[in-house]
Amino acid sequence: MDFFHLFLLAAIQGLTEFLPVSSSGHLILLPLLTGYRDQGQVLDVAVHVGTLFAVILYFRRESFSAFAGLGHLARGRRDTEAARLAWLLIVATVPVIIAGLILKLTGLDDLMRSVKVIGWTMLIFGIVLYWTDQKGGQTRKSAEWNLRDAVILGLWQALALIPGTSRSGATISGARALGYGREDAARIAMLMSIPTIIASGTLLGLEVAATADAAAARDGALAALMAFVAALLALGLMMRLLRSVSFTPYVIYRIALGVVLLVIAYR
């Protein structure tokens, strides 16, 4: 694969993975709208690994706490803050794993990869993001995250398996509806992405492990590095902007792109 295609793929994945605009939707649209061949699963895994390391680095204190919490849970300890965070992340990840397996086994995941579906989900969930952001409270903090909220946000996250919905957008919408402030809603959504990306990356990785060659591995390593840099920049920018700006700019982008895609799809 040529360098520009790799760069475009990594930049799209890195910039959109954590912004509430749907990375999967943009990656599906890339070959459909540019004529490039589909990037394949090897590169899908690579760019997801890049974004995974970006979010772990950016939220390194919470990430290390969650990983330490897994050790506490393995030893039967649930009375630590680390164990509580790890347990909540596990609970929040279960719905998306179950829904993902159902879609994979039934073939519905492939059927939903269309411009029409992405156009509608961009539009509808853009409006949902706007409504929850405007109506949601600003008082709850991420430290107040509890088991009930983890289940609810896990269900919101499962909705993002529909292309164009946006995993971060869905979970941020759910968190805002539950009354979490903008920064805290984004923080919870980003932490929830870690086990989700690990689960999806592991599944894809097992599928491609036997078929990857040296050229694919080289392309994958380069794409992962570029996606890491792009994701780190996007994360830093979004978290800083949320101190003074709402999610409305992302909503405008989603609605505009959704309308354009629907015009293309129905013409």
Image (cartoon, grey):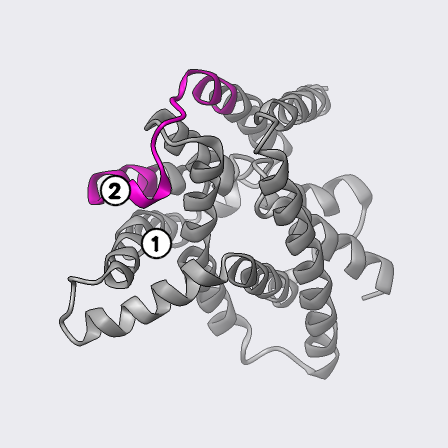
Q: Is residue 133 magenta?
A: yes
- Residue on which the image places disc 2: 151
Q: Amino acid at mark 2?
A: Val
Please rate how many residues cluster around mark 1, counting C-alpha atoms within 10 Å: few if below 14, some from 14 to 19, many from 20: some
| Visible residue check, residue 25 | no
Upstream in sequence: badge 1 or badge 2: 1
- Residue on which the image places disc 1: 97
Secondary structure under the numbered disc 1 in the rendered image: helix
Left of 221 or right of it: where is 125?
left
Q: Horizontal and vertical percent for residue 208? A: 55, 72
On screen, 257 above or below 38? above
Dominant secondary-structure state across the stretch colored magenta: helix
Tell me which segment is drawn in magenta: 129-155
Q: Horizontal and vertical percent for residue 46? A: 62, 67
Residue under the point 71% across and 54% down: 230
Left of 197 or right of it: where is 77?
left
Q: Amino acid at mark 1?
A: Ile
Residue under the point 41% across and 58% down: 62
Q: Nearer the viewer, residue 138 or 11?
A: 138
Left of 73 or right of it: where is 49?
right
Residue under the point 24% across and 63% down: 83
